[in-house]
């Protein structure tokens, strides 16, 4: 099994690169953003609660996203590995993910962290907002609130995995294929090491 976290601030290219990586490496894609948006479009109780936070650019409560990931892991026990996209986003989520994976006798092999300047992030998200219909992309103030939330609560998640020497920084600016090649090179190297 090979489990990776694709990490980075909002707009750093996690969703974009995940699509290409799951197809190349046959990993199960677990994006908490996508799972939450699907709950919202199905108008479930969970979706209605999550929307209140997402519309402000805030993180959804830990218990909600951890519950979703727990269900997704249980429903995919035959997967060859997981690509976690947008999760974990807090220290509590990271600890809980480690616990859930160790129950399944596996762990995180690597965290690939995309590095992108703040101005580039804002530019990308405003551009996506023109066509995505996502309420959290339409207003620059909300986009900046999401980036602030990342610095306040999420950036430290990298420290958690750094203690185990599992963080690899990757330049997230340039063409999509160029960044994909950088990520693939790291995965090809790390897959041989079998961390877990
Ligand atoms: P997410 O769905 O995770 O969305 P994101 O971080 O905004 O975007 P992502 O990083 O995937 O976008 P990408 O760069 O690919 O989260 C949305 C919200 O859900 C959060 O704010 C939070 O409220 C909630 N949430 C999710 N997970 C949570 C959790 N674990 N705990 C609590 N709350 C949670 O794409 C951005 C744009 O850049 C695209 O338009 C793309 O085309 C473009 N782009 C990508 N690569 C590019 C490149 N190389 N050059 C130019 N443009 C590029």
Image (cartoon, rainbow, N blue to C red):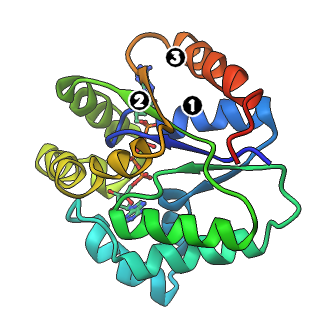
Measured as percent of width and height from the top left, residue 119 is found at 17, 25
> Could you tell me if the residues under marks 1 and 3 are in contact, i.e. CB atoms within 8 Å?
yes
Q: Nearer the viewer, residue 12 or 54?
A: 12
Q: Badge 3 local density, few (<14 within 10 Å), some, or many (20+)? A: some
> Could you tell me if the residues under marks 1 and 2 are in contact, i.e. CB atoms within 8 Å?
yes
* Alpha carbons under labels 1 and 3: distance apart: 8 Å
Q: Residue furthest bottom?
A: 45
Give the labeled residue for mark 3: 179
Q: Is mark 2 within 8 Å of ligand 1?
A: yes
Q: Is residue 37 above or below residue 123?
A: below
Q: Is residue 43 above or below residue 38?
A: below
* Alpha carbons under labels 3 and 2: distance apart: 9 Å
Measured as percent of width and height from the top left, residue 184 is found at 65, 20
Classify the position of ligand 1 by quadrant: top left, top right, bottom left or bottom right. Answer: top left
Number of the label disc, if any, that sits on residue 114? 2
Q: Residue furthest right?
A: 78
Q: Is mark 1 within 8 Å of ligand 1?
A: yes
**Which residue does the image show at 34% across and 62% down from the upper left?**
90
Number of the label disc, if any, that sits on residue 17? 1
**Residue 121 quadrant:** top left
């Amino acid at each position: 099994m090979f489990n990776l976290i694709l990490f980075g601030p909002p707009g750093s290219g996690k969703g974009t690169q995940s699509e290409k990586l799951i197809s190349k490496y046959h990993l199960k894609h677990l994006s908490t953003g996508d799972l939450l948006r699907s709950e919202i479009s199905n108008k479930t109780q969970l979706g209605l609660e999550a929307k209140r936070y997402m519309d402000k650019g805030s993180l959804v409560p830990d218990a909600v996203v951890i519950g979703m990931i727990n269900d997704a892991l249980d429903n995919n026990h035959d997967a060859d590995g997981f690509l976690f996209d947008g999760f974990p986003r807090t220290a509590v989520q990271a600890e809980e993910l480690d616990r859930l994976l160790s129950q399944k006798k596996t762990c995180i092999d690597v965290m690939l962290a995309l590095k992108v300047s703040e101005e580039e992030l804002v530019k990308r998200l405003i551009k996506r907002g023109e066509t995505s219909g996502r309420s959290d992309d339409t207003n620059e103030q909300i986009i900046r609130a999401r980036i602030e939330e990342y610095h306040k609560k999420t950036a430290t998640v990298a420290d958690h995995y750094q203690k185990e020497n599992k963080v690899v920084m990757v330049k997230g600016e340039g063409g999509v294929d160029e960044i994909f090649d950088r990520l693939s090179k790291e995965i090809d190297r790390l897959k041989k090491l079998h961390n877990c």
